[in-house]
Amino acid sequence: MKRILCALLACVLCASVIIGLSGCGCSNSSQQEPGYKVSATEPDLKNEDFGFFIIENKELMVTEYLGSDTDIKIPESLDNYKVTVIGHSVFNGKNITSVEIPDTIVEIQDYAFSSNQDLKNIKLPKNLKTLGSNVFFNCRNLASVELPPTIEDLGLYTFSATGLKNVTIPESSTLTKIDHYTFYQCQNLTEVTLPATITEIAEDAFSDCPNKITIKAPSGSYAQQYAETNKFDFEETK
């Protein structure tokens, strides 16, 4: 009898969880690593080019690209909702050549712009806090990027297999960590400018980058120590 009661209770709990998650468009299966995937099955709102899910505080997440243009402009608002997040894989492999991102965006999720071979330059929004895993993976012609001072988190493989020649993280940034494989297989990378706030760089952050890389950072910083330990060239910034 006790086993039957436990089984019934478990069924009730499972049903409650399913009901609670239905309609949110979210999935957190361990087989979908890395990260959190949003499936844009039926957008809450949409215009000619984009589908959106409504998230908290009258904000929107871009979850679907419906257009065909290769030069893309993401709106900063729709129907009195502010667009704050670019969702998982929205522009993955869409052959885009340029994208204008509004400063309302604070998060860009996993694979958002991956495998766009013709994307050469991108201006990241000034209020951006989070770049997820593989956001620009395999964007082989992406030549340069400057991260905003607001950036707090870079995911795994964020810029892996890109065409980056140089990258700058501002001295005023609060970013503290360069994660595993962030710049993996960047064939053209020769220069990285890092702030004094960086206190951790994964040993494989620059794995399989064939060129000699110069790390520019303040004297006495962790970045200088990392450069010397790993035989990178070092140049002091002021």
Image (cartoon, rainbow, N blue to C red):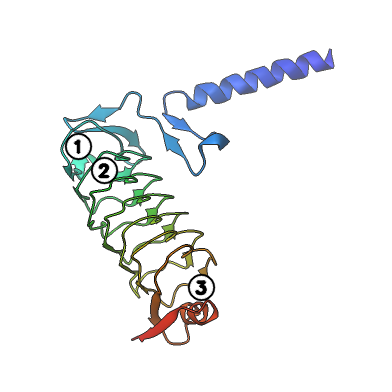
Instruction: Residue 11: give x, y in percent of width and height.
Output: 66, 18
Q: Quadrant of the C terminus?
A: bottom left
Q: Which residue is mark 3?
A: 199
Percent position (x, y) of residue 163?
A: 31, 59
Q: Earlier in the sequence, mark 3 or mark 2?
A: 2
Residue at which label 2 appears: 83
Query: Given contact means CB atoms under 8 Å apart, are the residues at marks 2 and 1 in contact?
Result: yes
Relative to residue 66, is residue 5 drawn left or right?
right
Q: Residues within 10 Å of mark 2 (few under 14, many from 20)?
A: many
Query: Compared with residue 233, is residue 89 higher up or lower down, i.e. above or below?
Result: above
Which residue does the numbered mark 1 point to in the structure image?
78
The amino acid type, in three-letter code, at marker 2 is Val
Comparing 30 with 230, the one in front is 230
Q: Is residue 68 above or below residue 150?
A: above
Q: Where 153 falls versus 24 (above or below)?
A: below
Towards the viewer: 83 or 87: 87
Amino acid type, residue under disc 3 in the picture: Thr
Single out the mark in the foreground, 3 or 2: 3
Q: CA distance from mark 3 to mark 2?
A: 32 Å
- Crowd band around label 1 with a 10 angstrom C-alpha radius: few (<14), some (14–19), many (20+): some
Residue at image coords 52%, 35%: 28
- The residue type indicated by label 1 comes to Leu
3D distance between C-alphas at marks 2 and 1: 7 Å
Question: What secondary structure is found at the residue carrying circle 3?
Answer: loop
Compute the Cα span from label 3 to label 1.
Answer: 40 Å
